[in-house]
Amino acid sequence: MKDIITLGIESSCDETSVAIVKNGREVLTNVINTQIEIHKQFGGVVPEIASRKHIENISNVTKFALKEANLNFNDIDIVACTYGPGLVGALLVGVGYAKALSFALDKPLVGVNHIEGHIAANYINFSELEPPFLCLVISGGHTHLVYVKNYTEFEILGKTRDDAIGEAYDKVARVIGLEYPGGPKIDKLAKEGQANIKLPETYFDNLDFSFSGIKTAVLNLNHKEPNINKADLCASFEKATTDMLINNTEKAIKNMKVEKIALAGGVSANSYIREKFKDLGEKLKIHVYYPELKLCTDNAAMIASAGYYNFIAGRISGLDLNAVPNLKIGEI
């Protein structure tokens, strides 16, 4: 069987990334041009600036990826790109560039759901991982408990009703004086503190999440007690939010009777969350997977992997593919 080489493009937020992946799992190159230093001065991503930087970077990033993989455009079999969810201007840059490549090279175009891309990051790190399994997708824009039926079919078991967990992390970090991006800074500072502050945890009858209550509680505490120990506050926030993730995930594992669970998304890089999910796996005697750190955050290798599985399932996009900023998981 001929190897299938996929060129993946990711531009949903503030990373311009191009990757080349063989047969959905073997990464030949994964180039990520990040804009963190640019957006840090604003305390978060500025959509218009992000879009302009993608336009400036995408051609050079693509050329660099091909050079690093020692390939040329003729070696590419599929062009895959993120078309949602994300910032509409940023998405349009990647989608437009992918469509131009697909047309010029006469190669199939495959639009990829960004959230499904995060799930696929696990396939790159773990050659043995195959559906079905449970996946907790936790990032700046998403908090989803997903049952992965097969490579292209997904069932949402629970999701956030308000803030995504990464959004809550970034807002808390900003208020207590930590630089953007806030998640890694909270993770680092929490190691110096004790989880000795009682914070509200929100639970529902189903498997949905809510992080607005705990976020507001931390903001109010910081305002009322400006001398509060910031390390203790971070440790307490991290523990309470992780407790909520663990509670719902454990219920889902028992409901679905799964033996495998994966983590995905930027927040899955958090060391405390990884440790607690490892403990959960040992407690329930199930396999727990999480991608290496560089595959947790936005990258094109995960998009190329998901694009490959969409392609072999016959899901090919037309040149009328457009950005869908509010795309839901499982939507086509």
Image (cartoon, rainbow, N blue to C red):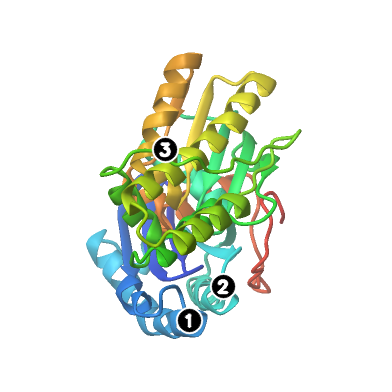
Cβ–Cβ below 8 Å for labels 2 and 1?
yes
Q: Secondary structure at mark 1?
A: helix
Which amino acid type is shown beneath numbered disc 1?
Ser
Q: CA distance from mark 3 to mark 1?
A: 32 Å
The disc, 2 or 1, on the residue closer to the chain's N-terminal end is 1
Left or right placement of residue 21 versus residue 251 in this view:
left
Residue at 30 percent across and 56 percent down: it is: 29
Q: CA distance from mark 2 to mark 1?
A: 8 Å
The disc, 3 or 1, on the residue closer to the chain's N-terminal end is 1
Residue at 64 percent across and 27 percent down: it is: 252
Which label sits on residue 289? none
Residue at 66 percent across and 46 percent down: it is: 159
- Above or below residue 93? Residue 122 is above
Please state, as top left, top right, bottom left or bottom right, where the C terminus lies in the image.
Answer: bottom right
The disc, 2 or 3, on the residue closer to the chain's N-terminal end is 2
Which amino acid type is shown beneath numbered disc 2?
Leu
Residue 304 in sight from this viewpoint: yes
Q: Secondary structure at mark 2?
A: loop
Location of residue 107 in the rendering, given as x and y in whole percent from the top left corner: 52, 65
Q: Which residue is disc 3 drawn over?
A: 273
Q: Secondary structure at mark 3?
A: helix
Q: Which residue is disc 2 drawn over?
A: 87
Q: Which residue is disc 1 drawn over?
A: 51
Which amino acid type is shown beneath numbered disc 3?
Ile
Q: Which is nearer the eye, 263 or 197?
A: 197
- Above or below residue 297? Residue 62 is below
Residue at 64 percent across and 25 percent down: it is: 251
Location of residue 220 in the rendering, given as x and y in whole percent from the top left corner: 53, 59
